[in-house]
Image: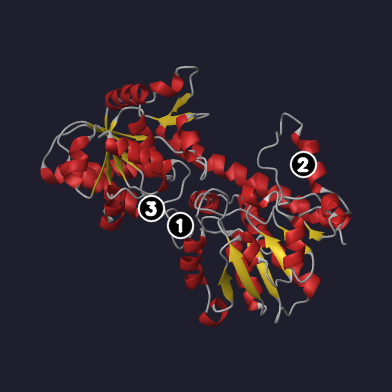
Amino acid sequence: MKITIIGTGYVGLVTGACLAELGNDVFCLDLDAGKIATLNGGGVPIHEPGLDDIVARNRAAGRLHFSTDVAAAVAHGTLQFIAVGTPPDEDGSADLQYVLAAARNIGRYMNEFKVIVDKSTVPVGTAERVAAAVQAELDARGVDARFSVTSNPEFLKEGAALEDFMRPDRIVIGCHATPEGERARELLKTLYAPFNRNRERTHWMDVRSAEFTKYAANAMLATRISFMNELANLADKVGVDIEAVRHGIGSDPRIGHSFLYAGCGYGGSCFPKDVQALARTAQGHGQELLILRAVEAVNDRQKRVLGAKVAQRYGADLGGRHFAVWGLAFKPNTDDMREAPARALLAELLQRGASVAVYDPVAMDEARRVLALDLPAAQLARVGYAASAMDALAGADALIIVTEWKTFRSPDFERIKAQLKEPVIFDGRNLFEPADMAEAGIEYHGIGRSILTRA
């Protein structure tokens, strides 16, 4: 099938590459000429394991194309996937300017039937706005071309996006109950047939329900995380091990084990903005989503828990103190630092007068960029970028772990002790067992592990 992907960001590029891998002829459009030049030059502008290989393979096979030519993009695919960004607006609602601009471009150039697929995460009612934008352009041109706007939200986890796309646990598609909507349904059924060979993974529904499903899913996952983080903070005060609690409640099949890990808060491009956007949608309809407001508040507070533990241990004034920080990306296997807990931690440590040496396996370049935006020059001068995890430890008062990269899970603890001024670890992801740390002679501060082990 001939497919157009509008937007070569995280969702668009993964979607386009994976659909090309299935044998489709995919045209990826982006108005950022620099990004298109990078892709046509063999580069990939985002970090996602395996993505560079799949892009290179399908470019070489002639199934994956990148261009800034809007007219050519609209002409190419009967299926037009809109996969542009929907950043939060000032009031927390989703900013649809790029989605609607893509819709207008489709209407400006289309001359035959098109299925317009909203792949971006968009609020309920966006399909109607997209349809109106397309129709307005067609009317202005006097063109009578049929189309259908559908919703096909993505459920990709950064760091595992290729696996999620190629082996999805569900495919959500919303179509209209019209002749054009039925035609769209048949085309999308054909497109996704390879994913349904073993069992039916597609959930068909109306368009508004599909739009809502994406927000509901992310809101539920964010709620689980904040719920466990709030319990972890209480566990620290009442002498409870949150890891034991996690196993105890996760064994209940009604609850399950996923997204029950206590830590230093969630970040990234999805959960924070989607929780805000859903809450804003509710406000627009006269309803307050009290649970989601609490989820946001708990997460904002949780990002400061590590800093509070450091201040409790060393005092509010951290002038003259130096800390090693492992992990900057909001999660492993990505260089994404949007809303990353590390940013909140570094801001607090530096504001209290400390200096830091930071290390992340892939996010160092992105860290330099975002920290230059976050921090005043005087604080930025106290940030050192280490060449390795062990290099970051040299002369530090303590090690602080923020991101659960696999490479951090089994370090040489004797080397860590030798590099640090004192053997102290603040573990924002509970990578290690307190008893093991005590045996190793390391003072250990986890999240919700109740008894702080000291050498």
Quadrant in the picture for residue 2? top left
Instruction: Count the marks.
Output: 3
Q: Nearer the viewer, residue 312 or 40?
A: 40
Image side of residue 98 versus residue 286, left or right: left
* Residue nearest the viewer, comparing 2 with 182: 2
Which type of secondary structure does the marked residue at label 3 adopt?
A: loop
In the rendered image, is residue 16 in sight? Answer: no
Relative image position of residue 292 (x, y in whole percent):
61, 50
**Hey, which quadrant is residue 418 in on the image?**
bottom right
Label 2 CA crowd tier, 10 Å (few <14, some 14–19, many 20+): some
Closer to the chain start, of discs 3 and 1, is: 3
The amino acid marked with disc number 1 is Pro
Precedes in sequence: disc 3 or disc 2? 3
Residue occupied by mark 1:
88
Identify the secondary structure beneath mark 2: helix
Q: Closer to the N terminus: mark 1 or mark 2?
A: 1
Indicate the colouring scheme. secondary structure
Q: Residues within 10 Å of mark 3 (few under 14, many from 20)?
A: some
| Image location of residue 142, percent across then percent down | 11, 41
Give the structural element (helix, strand or loop) at label 1: loop
**Residue placed under numbered mark 3 in the picture:** 45
- Cα–Cα span, label 3 and label 2: 37 Å
Read off the residue under disc 2: 246
Quadrant that contains the N terminus: top left
Residue lying at 70% horizontally and 46% vertically, measured from the top left: 261
Residue 384: x, y in percent?
A: 57, 72
Spatial separation of the CA atoms under disc 1 and disc 2: 33 Å
